[in-house]
Image: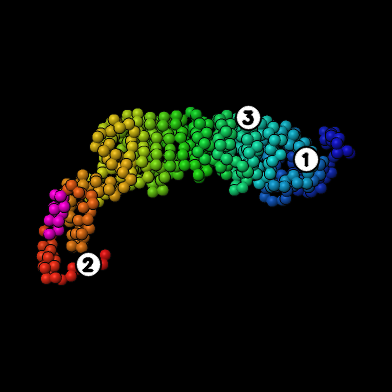
Amino acid sequence: MSSSSPIDYDALEATADIEEMTENEFNQCTLQSLKNDKLPDLWLSPEWNEHGDYVLEGSTEELGWLGHFVKKSTRLERFGLYGSEVFKECSKQSVDLFLDDLGECNHIKKMNFSYTILEGIIYKLGPAMKNNNIIHLVVERCCLGVPEANFLFNTLRDMISLEELYINCGLGDGHGLNDGGMAGSIPSLATCTGIRKLTLNGLNLSTNSCAALSGVFPRILSDDGLDALIQGLPTSAATLHLGGNEVTLARQLPLLRFKELGLWGNTLCLDGPRVIAASLANPQCHLESLNLVRCNIGNEGAATLAEGLRNNQKLTLMLLDENGITEEGWNAYLPIMCNPASINATHGSNHTLQDLGYRYMVRQDIQTMLDLNSDQNKSRVAATKILQTHRHLDMRPLLDGRLILMPHVVAWLDRFAECRLDLKLSSLYEFARAMPMEVVEELSGMKKGKKRRRSSA
């Protein structure tokens, strides 16, 4: 039969045996199940492995029979290609015909492409992806150039049933993909309103792409959607703005990784501030900027957030405007930024937070602490708070060190308390009163010309 003449598989099906369609016994079993409309999954692979239900061996007619039964199947729900040379032994014409037949099967729910060279064939896969109610699409370690990526994302516009999208390009698999190009493709996801899980790895996403992602799902992104989005973002994504959605933070979500997070306009549940506070209290938290404007925080939520900042050394800005917070809520922040319980407590206070929103919202003493924290020299910030809070320094914790520590105390006072002569004198007086004989002996030794003892410390 001439290769240029189309084969009438419908006419041949009545008389042809499975053994005539393919010589391989494993392929015969798969083809028989497909013919009998009892095959739910079909993987094509260049060699036998755990992925391969069918290994193509180069026969144009064999691939034709496969496409013929795929086209007629009403039970086939999953189709996959595995391997870079899955169609190596097949002619381009036979591959094109098979993909055309695949496009006529409208029962497939899941598609997987793994380690496959999609250049050339992805354009023929378009109808198959569009004509089916695909809910699960996986593109794993496939070579994707800019044209292929653009086509793939444009095709997503018609995949309105999609619930899970997994794209993972390993190093070297995404040829020429960049942040700007992906930012232009990502808006195609907006029509996939049922998406529940999103993974986008190895696509060189950065600031522009993440900004595009944040605008893809306006008013439909809930906690589940946020979780899926965070899990799908590359580790390099440090900024996420999701204002005006339906995020409630009813459960703990992985917020630690971001440096900048915008959740303005989301009505958080009562436990929402506690979820954020837990992240802020975690030593692994990277958050530096947090926008919580109009998030239903209230006084109780404000106090909860303040407690999360007790040992936080990263967050500099937390916008809390328009959250119904009164003086009761703001009061929680003063002891966090300047704990007066002791000198050590003051020294260990939060010296990082610099902005809580509009200045008119908070009391002047709290705003003073925020302004003080803006100094990059945190030693000076801590010292200033100590001097402002403790009018008389308690030297008792230092007396166990005897006179060895006195020079350090004097040096510290010289550095940070230039205008507090009273503080210097009272501190020295406490040393002398606690250890009079050591002071007398030290002075007596100096008069006799003895060398002063030096600490080895």
- Per the image, label 2 sits on a secondary structure element best described as loop
Q: Position of residue 391 (x, y in %)?
A: 17, 46
The kind of residue tagged 1 is: Lys
* View extreme (right): residue: 1
Q: Is residue 426 magenta?
A: yes
Mark drawn on residue 454: 2
Q: Nearer the viewer, mark 2 or mark 3?
A: 2
Q: Which residue is mark 1?
A: 92
Mark 2 / mark 1, whichever is N-terminal = 1
Q: Which residues are magenta?
A: 421-432
**Residue sitting at 65 percent across and 38 percent down?**
148
Q: Is residue 227 left or right of residue 340?
A: right
Separation (CA) of disc 2 from disc 1: 89 Å
Q: Residue at x 18, y 70 (%)?
A: 451
Q: Amino acid at mark 2?
A: Arg
How would you classify the magenta stretch by its main secondary structure?
helix
Dot 1, how many residues are within 10 Å of its Cα: few (below 14), some (14-19), or many (20+)?
A: some
Earlier-in-chain disc, 3 versus 1: 1
SS for tag 1? helix
- Where residue 389 sits in the image (x, y, percent)? 20, 45
Q: Which residue corresponds to mark 3? A: 158
In the shown orientation, is residue 198 left or right of residue 6? left
**Toward the viewer: 92 or 222?**
92
**Distance between mark 3 and mark 1 Cα atoms:** 27 Å
Q: Residue 336: where, in percent of width, then height?
A: 28, 43
